[in-house]
């Protein structure tokens, strides 16, 4: 490990992944300021959710700053240079400074000098305290250093000429006020990462302006506004655009997507709370239960800070309660925007009619323009397509999603093909939006249709790279196929390159699967809890099943959880009621998922006829016997909470691309040499009983290995040195690990 602070200049030599981006890089002389000013500065940056590169551990001595440090500088959007009395005494600090000034020139990085108890003119001219330091550098390097000293002098002069902040007398200066001003500078100068809003959003600016009026930004009180409307009307896009415009005005901001979908997962409310904390604080925060999560959110995320928060796709008051959405939770000046299809989900907030914005559908001209951008890549149709385009626009009914999908579908087609498709549209009822969207699905090739259904059932929210590599194991040219779906507006990507599918398109795909058969065991994909449990318990699965997803919940429900729910008149999701009686008197209808994962026992013989299964999720499920019955064609196996101490010898895994066994009871992964030549992802995090890693010699393709929080891990197998394709290795919090193999 190279030393970037061997003479006290605190920075890092930890390799930074290429995709990592920091808001701020801080260059400082550790011996001067580590325990006072910069310690307070880092705390303030972190408290304000500003992603700051920092690693001021004592490092080994070395001659040069590391590649990891250089990447960290290049990957930061702003550099703060804390000039202190002995900053120039460290050649490592000076090398940092040279690279920072290069990034200012070539990458347009923002650079702000901070003069901490030094005179700016001394830095600019290398006089005063800096004169002695440079005399030593001249003596050491002389003229045979390729102009190193001259480069240092030039970088100091250039940096000191920039506009910055000063604290010239540590004893009498107000350090707290200085840090406050620096934070203000960072928030103003570093453009926050904006949410992705596709180009050519016709009529969007007008709708955003209408919503902005409702926020009353000029008044210093807490304001909560709802955006209510049908799916595909543009609620999320409007919220994203306004968020991008105003987020710089707030001390903290966060956009929480897919609230409804997340809350329906096992332990979904806790997962929502964690996502909110990450969105607001820009760092993860553990929460053990939803009650604790509410208090953590109030005190740590919302407390004492003016917050902008967007909650996207809320459909139940319990979600709002779990996220502490109450005016009393926020400081004055905060703004909360909530998008929903169900107006009643906002009733707990007691919003008035002027607090809820209902986006209007696009008018005929707007609709024609949006359709044209997607069909012809221009703002109006060609003359010979004008009449046909108007007919299609009529059938889309002013719904932006339908216009985008239909426009992409018709792009490049001949006029006879347009006329044929329009004839089909005429047969679809005006209010059947899914039917209109399905016309685009029906036009796809068989392979693309399968990919739409796989995405709708299994891949929403999954990283693009991970998805591509799973599907490549199924002999699909996935990267090209996924691109085709994106071109047709059937999928998109979020800022983390995860696959996004509009709820209406996802629902269309799932409905297509549901209509394959009245018997769930004869459908191609199983994800709905009741259907999965029926198939596994009755053993009705067939070779038609390609993918099965089960997040186990507690099926041993007694009557006590209903004790307080005296208004309950309809209960669709009995399995989602927790055993400890978390239901309350406010529960009137559909119940949300309040539970932690609980074991469901299934006989593996239920998989005997599902021999085409390539995707299997059995999180927190116990199989009693018969592991040999599980399909030999599996590509992606997720079995969080795997109950055994070792994977059985008769469990076939030869074709696996991804194996996820986090939170398992494993003491050893397997007890023999395994040849898994296609395995790219092996996730063993939080396996608290795992004492040593498996033999990796048969895992020639492995790219990601997660072992974080394996608290009993004491030994890593020597074969890890053979993993030439490994790009991600996470071994944080392996507290008993003694050493890694030499030369790894």
Image: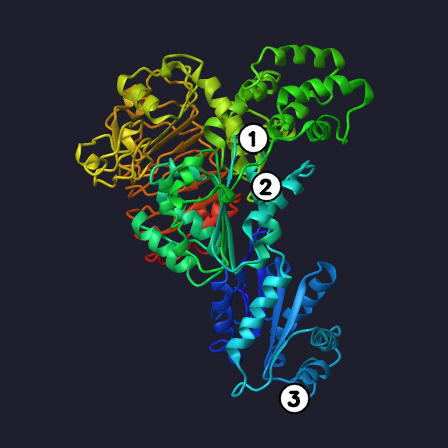
* Mark 3–mark 2 distance (CA, rounded to whole Å): 59 Å
Q: List the residue tagged with mark 1.
A: 232
Q: Residues within 10 Å of mark 2 (few under 14, many from 20)?
A: many
Q: Residue at x 54, y 19 (%)?
A: 432
Q: Residue at x 29, y 27 (%)?
A: 570
Q: Is residue 366 above or below residue 92?
A: above
Of the two numbered discs 2 and 1 on the same chain, state the one appearing first in sequence.
Answer: 1
Per the image, label 1 sits on a secondary structure element best described as: loop
Q: Is residue 1 above or below residue 623?
A: below
Per the image, label 2 sits on a secondary structure element best described as: helix
Residue 392 quadrant? top right
Residue 126 or 277: which is nearer the viewer? 277
Looking at the image, residue 653 sits to the left or right of residue 91; the answer is: left
From the top left corner, tell me how far across and down residue 245 is, in percent.
Answer: 62, 51
Q: Is residue 585 above or below residue 1?
A: above
Q: Which mark is residue 326?
A: none
Per the image, label 3 sits on a secondary structure element best described as: helix
Q: Which mark is residue 132?
A: 3
Q: Is residue 542 visible?
A: no
Q: Is residue 295 visible?
A: yes
Q: Residues within 10 Å of mark 1 (few under 14, many from 20)?
A: many
Q: Which mark is residue 238?
A: 2
- Of marks 3 and 2, the one in the foreground: 2
């Amino acid at each position: 490990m190279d030393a970037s602070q061997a003479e006290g200049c605190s920075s890092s030599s930890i390799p930074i992944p290429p995709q990592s981006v920091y808001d701020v890089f801080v260059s400082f002389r550790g011996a001067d300021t580590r325990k006072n000013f910069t310690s307070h500065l880092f705390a303030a940056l972190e408290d304000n959710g500003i992603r700051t590169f920092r690693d001021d551990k004592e490092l080994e001595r070395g001659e040069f700053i590391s590649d990891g440090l250089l990447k960290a500088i290049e990957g930061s959007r702003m550099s703060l240079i804390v000039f202190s009395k002995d900053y120039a005494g460290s050649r490592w600090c000076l090398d940092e400074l040279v690279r920072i000034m290069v990034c200012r020139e070539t990458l347009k990085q923002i650079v702000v000098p901070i003069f901490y108890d030094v005179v700016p003119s001394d830095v600019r001219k290398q006089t005063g305290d800096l004169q002695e330091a440079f005399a030593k550098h001249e003596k050491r390097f002389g003229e045979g250093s390729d102009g190193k000293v001259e480069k240092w002098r030039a970088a100091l002069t250039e940096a000191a000429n920039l506009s910055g902040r000063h604290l010239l007398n540590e004893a009498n200066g107000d350090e707290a006020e200085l840090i406050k001003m620096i934070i203000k500078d960072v928030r103003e100068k570093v453009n926050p990462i904006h949410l992705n809003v596709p180009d050519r959003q016709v009529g969007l600016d007008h709708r955003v302006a209408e919503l902005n009026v409702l926020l009353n930004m000029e008044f210093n009180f807490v304001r909560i506004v709802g955006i209510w409307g049908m799916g595909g009307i543009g609620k999320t896009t409007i919220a994203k655009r306004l968020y991008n415009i105003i987020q710089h005005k707030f001390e903290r901001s966060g956009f929480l997507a897919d609230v409804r979908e997340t809350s329906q997962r096992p332990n979904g409310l806790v997962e929502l709370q964690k996502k909110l904390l990450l969105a607001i604080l820009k760092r993860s925060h553990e929460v053990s239960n939803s009650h604790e999560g509410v208090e953590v959110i109030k005190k740590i995320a919302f407390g004492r800070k003016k917050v902008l928060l967007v909650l996207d796709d809320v459909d139940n008051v319990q979600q709002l309660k779990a996220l502490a959405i109450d005016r009393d939770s926020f400081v004055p000046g905060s703004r909360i925007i909530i998008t929903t299809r169900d107006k009643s989900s906002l009733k707990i907030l007691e919003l008035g009619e002027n607090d809820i914005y209902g986006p209007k559908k696009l008018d005929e001209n707007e609709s024609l323009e949006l359709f044209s951008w997607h069909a012809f890549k221009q703002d109006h149709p060609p003359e010979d397509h004008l009449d046909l385009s108007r007919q299609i626009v009529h059938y889309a009914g002013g719904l932006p999603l339908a216009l985008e999908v239909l426009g992409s579908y018709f792009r490049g087609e001949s006029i006879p093909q347009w006329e044929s498709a329009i004839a089909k549209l005429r047969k679809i009822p005006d209010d059947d939006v899914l039917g209109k969207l399905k016309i685009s699905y029906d036009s796809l090739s068989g392979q693309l249709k399968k990919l739409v259904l796989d995405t709708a059932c299994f891949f929403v929210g999954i990283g693009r790279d991970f998805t591509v590599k799973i599907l490549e194991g199924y002999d699909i040219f996935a990267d090209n196929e996924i691109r085709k779906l994106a071109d047709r507006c059937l999928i998109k990507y979020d800022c983390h390159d995860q696959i996004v599918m509009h709820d209406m398109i996802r629902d269309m795909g799932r409905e297509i699967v549901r209509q394959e058969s009245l018997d769930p065991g004869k459908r191609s994909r199983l994800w709905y809890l009741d259907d999965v449990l029926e198939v596994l318990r009755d053993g009705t699965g067939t070779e038609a099943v390609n993918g099965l997803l089960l997040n186990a919940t507690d099926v041993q429900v007694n009557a006590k959880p209903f004790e307080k729910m005296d208004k309950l008149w309809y209960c669709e999701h009995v399995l989602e009621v927790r055993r400890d009686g978390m239901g309350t008197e406010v529960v009137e209808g559909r119940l949300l998922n309040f539970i932690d994962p609980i074991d469901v026992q299934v006989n593996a013989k239920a998989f005997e006829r599902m021999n085409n299964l390539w995707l299997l999720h059995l999180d927190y499920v116990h199989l009693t016997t018969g592991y040999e019955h599980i399909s030999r064609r599996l590509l992606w196996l997720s079995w969080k909470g795997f109950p055994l101490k070792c994977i059985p010898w008769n469990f076939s895994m030869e074709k696996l691309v991804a194996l996820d066994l986090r939170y398992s009871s494993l003491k050893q992964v397997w007890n023999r040499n395994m040849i898994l030549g296609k395995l790219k992802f092996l996730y063993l995090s939080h396996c608290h009983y795992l004492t040593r890693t498996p033999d990796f010699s048969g895992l020639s393709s492995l790219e990601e290995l997660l072992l974080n929080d394996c608290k009993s891990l004491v030994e890593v197998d020597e074969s890890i040195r053979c993993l030439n394709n490994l790009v991600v290795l996470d071994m944080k919090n392996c507290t008993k690990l003694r050493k890694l193999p030499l030369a790894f």
